[in-house]
Image (cartoon, rainbow, N blue to C red):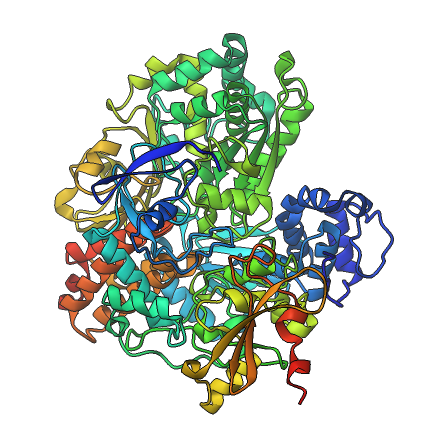
Amino acid sequence: MSDRQVEISIDGNDVTVNEGATLLDACREHNIETPTLCYLENLTPVNACRVCVVELEGSRTLVPACSRQAEPGMKIQTDSERVRHSRKLVLELLASSVDMSLANDEIQGFMKRYDAEPEKFGKTAPASAEGERDRRRTGHHHAPDGATAETVAQPVKIHDEMYVRDYSRCILCYKCVEACGVDAQNSFAISAAGRGFDARISTEFNTRLDDSACVYCGNCIGVCPTGALMFKPEHDHREAGTWDEASQSVTRTVCSYCGVGCNLELRVQDNEIVRVTSPTDHDVTDGHLCIKGRFGWQFVQNR
Amino acid sequence: MDLHWMDASPTEDERAAVDTLLGRADASDKPGEPLEEHVIRGGREAAENKRHLLLPTLHAVQGEIGWISAGALNYVCRRLTVPPAEAYGVATFYALLSTEKRPKRIAHVCDDIACKLKGADALCNELEATLEPDTWHRSPCLGQCERGPAVLFQLAGEEDRTLTAADADAIRSGLEGGADRPEPKPSTPQTQGSREEGLRLLRRVGVCDPTSLDDYREHGGYVSLRRAVSIGADAILREVKDSGIRGRGGAAFPMGIKWDAVAKAPATPHYIVCNADESEPGTFKDRVLMEEDPFAIVEAMTIAGFATGSQRGFLYIRGEYPLAKKRLQNAIDVATRRGFLGADVMGSSFRFDIEIRCGAGAYICGEETALFNSIEGFRGEPRNKPPFPTQVGLFGKPTVVNNVETLVNVLDIVGDGGPAFAALGSKDSTGPKLFCLSGNVERPGLYEVPFGTTLRELLDKSGATDNIQAVLLGGAAGTFLGPDELDIALTFEGTREVGASLGSGVVMVFDEHADMTGTLLRVAAFFRDESCGQCVPCRVGTVRVEEALQRMARSNGNGAADTALIDELALVMKDASICGLGHTAASAIQSALARNLLTTKDSDS
């Protein structure tokens, strides 16, 4: 990164940031809490969720902090009425159409901070039948009657012992697509398909993952912020009502399969590994793993 | 990483459809490998260079076979070295491509706002009762608003074609392979009967054979390019700047600034893109220009290329315009044969080539950066701006992107000079302007008037009734005006003053019998269908707007609360959406609610 500095004003305070920094970098550097959903340090910003928008003087619309670079003289507001309105509405629109109950604590915090009231769009419509959302004809929909609010609710997809895909929880942040593609794995097993509200994450022709290009690295699950993608053991615990985060411990270790030296974080409940991740700031993995580190831990528990 | 293909194989016909476009595969068919030697040797970069052929290849399969099977998609992916999941994502983005088997002949019947005024709902009801459900679909605006109800036939193995002023019998006959109707006359009332004097953009319409280069030249064609070549690029840029022309596609951006920026951009190559993805409901101006004066567009693009140092132009036509595509392809072929395109344009040693690209049923691809993604073989999702196209455009290079009508004006700007052009119209809105008149008017069609003409004058010209309930100005992304607002001057600044915009030049007239509630619901449904789905405010916001409007239409809920809800949604869409679709998706609905157009209907019934 260049050592040149850029001066901008955030909420009336003049601050200096590195040239090339985004407005989000600038806000974080100066401890201004900025909500994000589709942004992750180890992925290319797609700026699709729009929850990080800030008000930029001279701009007709708000701008996404995660991808807009700081330019000299920019004056931004991060907590104006317009900013609060857009952030609140984005959260409400998502929570009214997607099951956000397993979204991480940070997201739950945003909902509280912006007083999101997703109920205001009415009671939720019934879930669609299995596979129905995957076959919708592009550019067409059945007219709603307004009595209920449409959602993406649909049956969960479980086809193997490793992955659970619960697209009722998908906010279309594109993180999984990026992690599966050039940002990490280069498998390209999934993509956004369809259009508009019927857009969804899909393999080709909605084929099962084991028939697709998926290599089961689990990196998509690693980046999913809402629990739409989940490791099967975690899903089973949650279904059985035995998932108990408070009692879990995290052990950091190094993967023993090869010589690369990937750091692993083993989440353990009742002396049983329930989830394996890697720290996003670990310089070997950038938070990404392969199938062995992610799923090949059963031998540890071979008692 | 090797790509993973599907197991499915193409049929002989599917393979032939792809090979007709791409040529035969040059690598032997080994499982797990691409089918192109150069990709096997050249790796990722070689593959990326072919990605832009994805949409044309999908079109080729759809056009020949009638749908895109897993086997066909797999073969396309292996030929172009594209991951199947991504190709599926692209194919399912477009309404005119089908990844499920369907009949070889399909009728897309427009039930959008203009055709609704011409009885499209009754027509659709009749079709529902008499036709097999999978042989026809309701369609968003087909750009034939002046002569609806309109139908587009998608015919596997044959050229697609349109049918206007359609009725159920003609649709049935078209689906059964009945004969084509003769082409209707150009929809330009000013050129019929005693021809109006002084027309510029429409000067050749109705008098010049659109398929003949010689006729085009006899009617003033290629005079401007000759002048352009003799005065040089800098002088052209000066004329364009002096003309004060602003874009006619909807955003009204000064054209001179765009051209200048690209001409000066250090990165190379530069590209010219002509945005002919006209899809704004109520808009058909570019269609008429393309069908009736195609050489003018080719000449104007060539001048744009010459002025901005670009050697390659892309003409992106919406997939619903088969005749426009045919005429332009002919114009490009003839111009190339005769030295008006190609390696040595008019003996000037300047090289310029134009390629046609076809959309496939996606309004969003008229957004310039979505259009780039569509050409490049990706989903037509808009990009975040900045960077702007003049810096990072098509294939990541500096790109001029102009609407058809905007470009055609260049011929006069270069021919007569910028100041002469600026003398017409108002100070901030210079030149002539095309307006698309449809709905309850006696003489619907395309009208050319100088900027500054009032809306009332235009309505009088087209024979609008005295019993106007509302006029939609600018399209579905525009504004409804009431009968007391007809004296506004049709300029960018004049419409801005009343909170409206000229948009793409739509003037749709609704008389006192028009079903405004149904119209508004159709507008809301349109944006829900056409949102690309990338950003939350637009993807979910358009759904919530439609739901609120449905409640209001059914008087099922609290009207005031729903109006407030729509305002809240409109604000987040305007403030936080990625692109213009989301920014304007609720404008027309808000303007109608502000003018009580929804309740008018309720109190009547």
Q: Position of residue A132 (x, y in %)?
A: 51, 76
Task: Please tell me whether residue B545 is drawn above or below residue B230 in the rendered image.
Answer: below
In this orientation, which residue lies closer to the viewer: B126 or B376? B376
Q: Position of residue B13 (x, y in %)?
A: 77, 59
In this orientation, which residue lies closer to the viewer: B468 or A112? A112
Q: How many marks?
A: 0
- Residue located at (41% from left, 30% from top): B406
Task: Please tell me whether residue B110 is drawn above or below residue A66 in the rendered image.
Answer: below
Task: Please tell me whether residue B310 is drawn above or below residue B64 in the rendered image.
Answer: above
Which quadrant, please, contains the N terminus of chain B?
A: bottom right
Does residue B183 appear in this view? no
Answer left or right for B368 relative to A158. Answer: left
Task: Give residue A101's quadrant in the image.
Answer: bottom left
In this orientation, which residue lies closer to the viewer: B227 or B233? B233
Farthest residue, direction top:
B230
Q: Position of residue A51 (x, y in %)?
A: 34, 57
Q: Position of residue B144 (x, y in %)?
A: 43, 48
